[in-house]
């Protein structure tokens, strides 16, 4: 009975039928309360259903049963962040980083730790975590974007440029990376390069409202009021 319910729950989860997955995984757990894989998977199903608090309970219980179940730490931290329990999320991620020094997802944990620190107003710790993420995995696109945004916010435009260029080298057609790099070039008064990057960003993703906004600013500074108004209108329509 346990194995049949567990396996069906897994298949339903994989197919996106989260409500049904919860039902069958709950039946499996009624037969075997210590099945960490079933409980972890039910936590994921709860999370995808938007039942964050129930997901948190399952992830925490999974860790209680098996402190070496590394995947549950990452998912627990994300759920805690969604529940605005930032201090607890930070503690969970730091615990995971200490427990699993050889984990393949450490860069992912470091970036999420950076997000949690940023939301807690801990700028220095946030920056250090983003930096650690890209140090551990230089091919981590999201890490470079996050670190670049921190540098940009701090006015370190040349360092921001380096990070966004790294991100763009990893995903040459990324509208987000093109946009961020275009904004930095605008701030550095390199209007020609900024224009090229922003226009390319729009071609990659026409929903990037800020690309239209900065193109409006570029054309305004170049004295082309007609095109400046045109892109400002597109910005308002896209928001």
Image: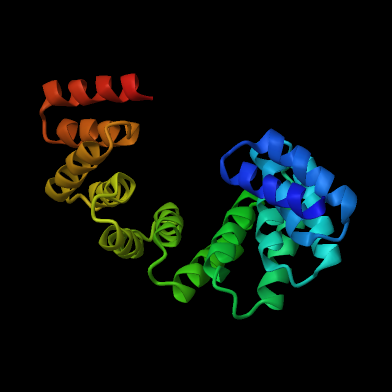
Q: Is residue 231 left or right of residue 24?
A: left
Residue at 14 percent of width and 25 percent of height: 227
Residue 27 rendering spot, x and y as whole percentages: 83, 44
User: In this rendering, is residue 81 above or below 171?
Assistant: above
State how many labels appear. 0
Residue at 42 percent of width and 54 percent of height: 149
User: In this rendering, is residue 125 above or below 185?
Assistant: below
Q: Is residue 58 left or right of residue 71?
A: right
Residue at 30 percent of width and 25 percent of height: 235
What's the coloring here?
rainbow
Q: Quadrant of residue 146?
A: bottom left
Q: Quadrant of residue 73?
A: bottom right
Q: Quarter of the image containing the C terminus?
A: top left
Residue at 58 percent of width and 57 percent of height: 112
Would you say residue 79 is visible in this rendering? Answer: no
Q: Quadrant of residue 108?
A: bottom right
Would you say residue 151 is visible in this rendering? Answer: yes
Q: Is residue 215 left or right of residue 96?
A: left
Residue 187 rendering spot, x and y as whole percentages: 28, 49
Residue 61 rendering spot, x and y as whole percentages: 84, 57
Residue 5 rendering spot, x and y as whole percentages: 76, 47
Q: Pick whichever, 226 or 139, lies toward us.
A: 139
Question: Residue extending furthest bottom?
Answer: 102
Q: Pick whichever, 199 or 153, lies toward us.
A: 199
């Amino acid at each position: 009975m346990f194995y049949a319910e567990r396996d069906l729950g897994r298949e339903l989860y994989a197919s996106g039928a989260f409500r049904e997955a919860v039902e069958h995984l709950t039946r499996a757990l009624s037969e075997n309360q210590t099945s960490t894989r079933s409980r972890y998977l039910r936590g994921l199903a709860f999370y995808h259903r938007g039942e964050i608090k129930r997901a948190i309970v399952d992830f925490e219980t999974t860790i209680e049963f098996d402190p070496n179940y590394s995947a549950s730490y990452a998912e627990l931290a994300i759920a805690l962040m969604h529940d605005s329990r930032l201090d607890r999320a930070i503690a969970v991620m730091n615990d995971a980083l200490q427990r699993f020094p050889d984990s393949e997802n450490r860069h992912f944990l470091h970036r999420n730790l950076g997000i949690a620190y940023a939301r807690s107003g801990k700028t220095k710790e946030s920056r250090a975590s983003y930096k650690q993420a890209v140090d551990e995995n230089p091919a981590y696109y999201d890490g470079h974007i996050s670190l670049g945004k921190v540098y940009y916010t701090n006015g370190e435009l040349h360092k921001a440029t380096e990070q966004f260029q790294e991100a763009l080298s990893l995903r040459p057609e990324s509208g987000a990376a093109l946009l961020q790099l275009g904004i930095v070039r605008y701030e550095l008064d390199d209007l020609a390069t900024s224009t090229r990057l922003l226009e390319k960003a729009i071609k990659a993703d026409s929903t990037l409202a800020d690309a239209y906004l900065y193109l409006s600013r570029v054309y305004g500074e170049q004295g082309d009021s007609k095109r400046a108004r045109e892109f400002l209108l597109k910005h308002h329509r896209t928001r």
